Image: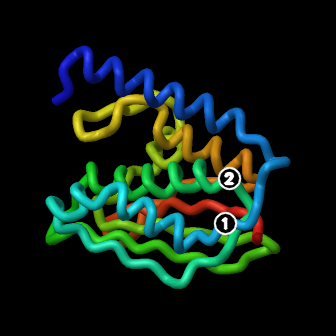
Amino acid sequence: MLSGAAAAGAVLDGIADYALALAIDASRFHPVPMDVIVRGAMARLSTQLRTSEATVSYDELPNVLGDADRLLQLCEYLVDRALRAGGPNGLRIRISAEAQNGMWLFTVLDNAGAMDAESLEAVFTPFAGMHANQRPGPGLATCRAIVERHGGRMWAESDPGGGCAFRFTLPPG
């Protein structure tokens, strides 16, 4: 559990991240290799990945048109969310992409436990449904804002296998 000062600092950091997501300038977009972005997120989370003994796998991922810093933030947050949620019998996270309707459809699938149907949209509301193992702040709302500023959309699905799938679309680069 975070101390009061640490929690307040984390909330302010989250608000700053959300503000950055809302200020994305599409005129500065360039081709971004998503496999490099995912490797960067894994490097930033290497300590948590080691201690949790989680397994992260990903396909060869495409280039997209976007802001590399914000896309790194998106991937890092989605993996961190799964790490904090945990998973039975070892956490597994799978990242994939497929071409769909002129966009790339990305899926971040984990086995950290399914969400009920009411939570699938509510998780994107800033500060909603805060639990002890979640980062304080507007986390998934920030992720959605990043995706929307890139011209895509983002949603969550409960996986019948007992996990969550976060899906989002991004333009090809």
- Crowd around label 2: few <14 · some 14–19 · many ≥20 (10 Å): many
Residue at the spot of label 2: 67
Q: Are marks 1 and 2 in contact (CB under 8 Å)?
A: yes
Figure label count: 2
Disc 2 residue type?
Answer: Asp
> Residue farthest to the right?
27
Taking the spot 49% from the left edge, 83% from the top edge, the residue there is 59
Residue 75 image offset from top left, x and y in percent: 49, 57
Pick the quarter of the image with the C terminus: bottom right
Can you identify the residue that label 1 sits on? 32
Dividing the picture into quadrants, the one containing residue 8 is top left
Q: Residue at x 20, y 27 (%)?
A: 2
| Image point (22%, 62%), residue name | 87
Coloured how?
Answer: rainbow
Q: Nearer the viewer, residue 61 or 111?
A: 61
Q: Is residue 75 above or below residue 160?
A: above
Under tag 2, what secondary structure?
loop
Front residue of 67 and 85: 67
Q: Residue furthest bottom?
A: 60
Separation of residues labelled 1 and 2 (CA atoms)? 7 Å
Compared with 107, 139 (above or below) is: above
In the rendered view, tell whether residue 140 sits above or below residue 56.
above
Relative image position of residue 93 (x, y in whole percent) = 35, 69
Q: Left or right: where does residue 70 sit relative to residue 128? A: right
Quadrant, the N terminus? top left
Which residue is depicted at the point 54% across and 44% down?
121
Res. 107 mark: none
Amino acid type shown at disc 1: Val
- Measured from the top left, where is residue 66 in percent x and y? 71, 57
Give the class, few, some or many, for how many residues have Cα within 10 Å of label 1's Cα (few <14, many ≥20): some
